Image (cartoon, grey):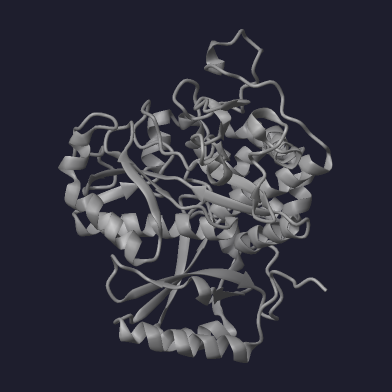
Amino acid sequence: MSIDPAALPPPAERAAQARLTAAKLRTVGVEGVALGWVDNAGIARVKAVPVGGLEHAAEWGVGAAPCFDVFLVDDSMATDRSVGGPTGDLRLYPDLDRLVPLAAQSGWAWAPADRYRQDGTPHPGCQRLFARRMEAAAAERGLTLRAGIEVEWVVAEAGPPEAEPVFPTRGPAYGMHRLTDLSDYLLDILRALGEQGLTVLQVHPEYAPGQFEVSLAAESPVAAADTSVLVRHTVRAVSARHGLRASFAPVVSPGVVGNGGHLHLSLWRERQNLCQGGPGPYGLTGEAEGFLAGALAALPALLVLGTPSPASYLRLVPSQWAGAYQCWGRENREAALRLVTGSTGEQATAANAEIKCFDAAANPYLTVGAVIAAGLAGLDEGLTLPPEVTADPADAPPGAVRRLPAGLPEAVEAYEKSAVLREALGEPLYDAVLAVRRAEIELFAGRSPEEIVAATRWRY
């Protein structure tokens, strides 16, 4: 008999684990625990308890209103047929296996939370439980996935939120100048991430002024989503300690390259990386090709989850390495789906695919879960990848390579046509996402790019 991935352990078992966890936290000076989740607008929300209240929180949950499912980026609310208004209650249950003391916030720990109804049944709108269900759906086929989400941010000097950002370094893109200017800051980020048990692969200056990126080791999809949230909390806290402010918004300065949230993933069966060693393009096995073909085919609809803000489409433009075209290519950084084969000799562990069109306005649990759903649908349909695009697709003849939606309304149209996403998400979550997207389209209608950027710059 399969185990329900969303089933809660018995209350006594949860309480016992929490007592042990709380005792350990006290030995390292933790006094408060932040229980976090990410809403459908991509905003990290939180309820916090004192360490002495962790046992009760783990046993019976912490109350949180269901209306958060339809919060917008500006904290206004959309309306939905099943969510909205002041009534109702859910319970936040911390995932104690992922709880970690926060190295850059003395006295605090953080844990991702899953949301349940008061009767203990899973909340159908919980994004993290959705991602766990999709992981389980892959596992039922004998498949596992390894994933990682790149985190890009722009750091600026602290100041009034309405002011244009002032960058603490004027060094060139990818330049050692930037690392030198902010050497202590970046070291503090590395130390904090390491103290929290995260494996950093690299940190480097990026293209835009004040922009950096950190990449972490691959994990299971839900763990990778957890890590991406934790990294952002950590970067934001370290920035504050240095008198700086971090933005993960899709665009921080109008007309300038924005922050991506690129998703890397590989498909595995019995410890075998299916992205190499097969007869398909560049060694893809049939299963890996079908999975990636499914994700590629669904990208217009997936943008509603992975590229979700009106601000996202100011970033998703051609010839800026954002992946604005629905195509794939080996090491093609202008393709929405980039195949990464790895250096000769390391393909067995390194081969993976990168979805470049996603950004950090996304709820990462929605992103990883939806990509799994689309990939499994590609397997079921026996899809294969279309011909490879080996150059900048913007240079191709008009119509030769399909452009991804250039605005959120077009992406919403694709989402509404996706039976795969509707079934995978379930009606309550599918509808709540749609309500938020439609409301944000209306919220930003008629605003200039400069106004959209100013309104979202410090929200993510």
Quadrant in which the N terminus appears = bottom right
Q: Is residue 439 left or right of residue 257?
A: right
Q: Is residue 48 left or right of residue 119?
A: left
In this rendering, the answer to whether 163 lies above or below 318 is below
- Residue at image point 55% right, 47% down: 349
Would you say residue 379 is visible in this rendering?
yes
* Quarter occupied by residue 281: top right
Q: How many marks?
A: 0
Rendering coords of residue 34 (x, y %):
42, 72
- Residue at image point 43% right, 29% down: 448
Q: Nearer the viewer, residue 441 or 241?
A: 241
* Quarter occupied by residue 190: bottom left
Would you say residue 439 is visible in this rendering?
no
Rendering coords of residue 170 (x, y %):
19, 33
- Residue at image point 19% right, 45% down: 182
Q: Is residue 388 left or right of residue 150?
A: right
Rendering coords of residue 379 (x, y %):
78, 42
In this rendering, the answer to whether 33 lies above or below 412 is below
Residue closest to the far front: 345
In this rendering, the answer to whether 202 lies above or below 319 is below
- Residue at image point 33% right, 80% down: 30
Q: Nearer the viewer, residue 172 or 426?
A: 172
Rendering coords of residue 419 (x, y %):
80, 43
In this rendering, the answer to whether 392 lies above or below 28 is above
Q: Nearer the viewer, residue 197 or 370?
A: 197
